[in-house]
Structure formats: structure tokens, C-alpha cells
Image (cartoon, helix red, strand yellow):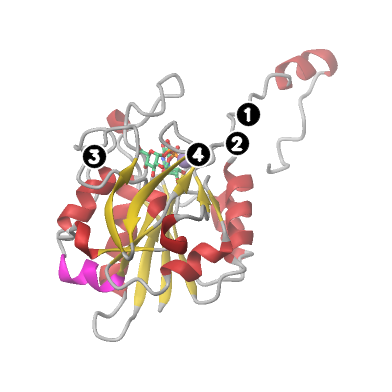
Amino acid sequence: PTIYLITPTYDRIEQRAELTRLYYTLLHVPNIHWILVEDSDRKTDKVRRFLANCQIPYTHLNVATPEQLKLKSSDPNWLKPRGVLQRNAGLTWIRSSLDKQTNRGVVYFADDDNTYSVELFEEMRSTKKVSVWPVGMVGGLRYESPICDRNSVTGWEVYFKPDRPFPIDMAGFAVNLQLFFDHPSAWFSNNVQRGYQESTILKLLDVTMADLEPRAEKCTKILVWHTRTEKYKIKNEAKLKLKRGKGTNPNIEI
Ligand code: UGA
Ligand code: MN
């Protein structure tokens, strides 16, 4: 099976660094298709140029988050959901470009700032319905994890909203491609409570606890980390400009 990786991404100083790091991980993964979805009205030259140099199969999409749903830089990051329309654009592409009868695959929603072990992708490749595993550095714990009894999930080791139907981070599960064909109205939504994106899509895919397949040695190994990159402050450009009349070369892309 092919792994279809849906990655929302948006223009910011850190973007090319994040994408480069993720790409170098994906280079180690056979049979993968990267669906990179920009949060913008148009595809940017920065991402176009980046993908042109990528040596893995990819699809470049874009859709802008409407202004009223966009996070301002002064907002706390949890105020509004992120990546919703972008993941949906990836699902639209999957449903319209792949063939239900012949394509075998697994869909994984991979944010551009997390850290992924190469092993994780081989764990998820055998997903029958939905595979699950722990995620490091998330939910204010060292890690969050499904609780496993032999080969079933019996509960959740989480602190934040443990009563959610599926209290799991986006990075903690993968879905067999067929489920998206069998449930054509399963989408992410901007109108769900904070922390309910994952539960919403899994519910719409008709997933139950009994369908969950533990991976990563019965959920005892951390193979993905919810890393978040520190916001970089370009605080000295203006000062440099004052001091010597110009800042750094604006033609150099960072
Ligand atoms: C957490 C979860 O890990 C995300 O999967 C979930 O989407 C998010 O919360 C949420 O509540 O919506 P977090 O690290 O806080 O993630 O969010 P980001 O990494 O900032 O954003 C998630 C993805 O959306 C990233 O791939 C990011 O590039 C993208 N994004 C972010 C956009 O496409 N547009 C934005 O304006 C911001
Ligand atoms: Mn993140």
C-alpha cells in the first residue's frame, strides 16, 4: 500500500526549514505520496520551487482559510482550528484522483512541524481500518497514548478532555484509504469544539474502539513527536537598516 501523507502548510519565516526537515524524513520512506496543501489563495513560488526539487511523488494543492477563521499572531494558538480546509482539500484530491477498486493505501495527516521517525511509516502501512500509536510531547504530558490490552485499545492515557470519543492527536493515527471511499461525507470541520477534529473525522468514518489497531509495539514506543518550532523574531533587521542604510539581501530566500 501507498502512504498518502496530507500536510497543511502556511507561509511564515520557518516554513522552508520545516518542509526541508519533513522532506528529508520522507526521502527514507518507500512508496509514499506527499500531498502538500498551502493555506493560501494561490500557490506560492516559495513552495513551488521547494517541491520542484523534491525527489518523491507529490501533489501541490492550495486553499485559503477564510479571514475570520485565521489565527492572528497575537492569538493563543488553540483559539482556532488549523489546517482544516487544507486537509479537506487533500481528501478531495484523494477521492477524485485515486481509484477505489485498484488503489491500496493508507492516509496520514502529517503536520509540517512535527518530528516523524522513519519506522512510523512502516508501522502504519499495514493499517486495515485505523491504526493508532502514542505521540510524544503533546497534551501537556510527556506523551499521550492509547491504552492497549493485547491487540485492542481499551482506553486512553490523556489529561486533556479524556471524554472525547477519540482523545488522540492528529499525529497519532492513520486510516485505510478505502474508508474514505466508503464514507464520502467524512470531512474535517471548522465548527467543532477545540480538540474535537480527530474525533469528528473518526466518527464520520464510522470507526469504533474495536476497529483501532495498536502499533509501535502495542503503543509502547514513541515514533512521532508533536514538536513546535519557536517563532523566530526578526528583531535586528530594522536596526541594521538604521545602522548601515540597508537590511540583509531581500532576494535571498530563507
Ligand atoms: C495541534 C494538532 O497537532 C493539529 O493537528 C491540529 O490541527 C491543531 O492543534 C488544531 O487544533 O487545529 P498545533 O501544533 O497546535 O497542532 O498546530 P500547528 O502545527 O500550528 O498547525 C497544524 C497544521 O496546520 C500545520 O501543518 C500548519 O502548517 C497548518 N496551518 C497552521 C495552516 O495551514 N494554516 C495556519 O494558519 C496555521
Ligand atoms: Mn504543530
Report the Cα–Cα distance between label 1 and label 4: 21 Å
User: Left or right: where does residue 134 sit relative to residue 66?
Assistant: right
- Does any atom of ligand 1 lie closer than 8 Å to the CB of label 3? no
Residue 120 seen in render: yes
Residue 80 drawn in magenta: no
Lower position in the chain sequence, tag 2 or tag 4: 2
**What secondary structure is the magenta-colored segment mainly?**
helix
Residue 178 drawn in magenta: yes
Instruction: Please say if the residues under marks 2 and 1 sit with CB atoms less than 8 Å apart.
Output: yes
Picture coordinates of residue 197, whole percent (x, y): 27, 44
Helix, strand or loop at label 1? It is loop
Residue at which label 1 appears: 232
Residue at which label 3 appears: 190
Report the Cα–Cα distance between label 3 and label 4: 25 Å
Q: Is residue 223 above or below residue 254?
A: below
Query: Residue at coordinates 24% horizontally, 40% vertically from top-left?
Result: 196
Binning the other alpha carbons within 10 Å of mark 2 as few (below 14), some (14 to 19) or many (20 upward) gives some
Q: Which residues are magenta?
A: 177-183
Helix, strand or loop at label 4? It is loop
Picture coordinates of residue 92, whole percent (x, y): 27, 62
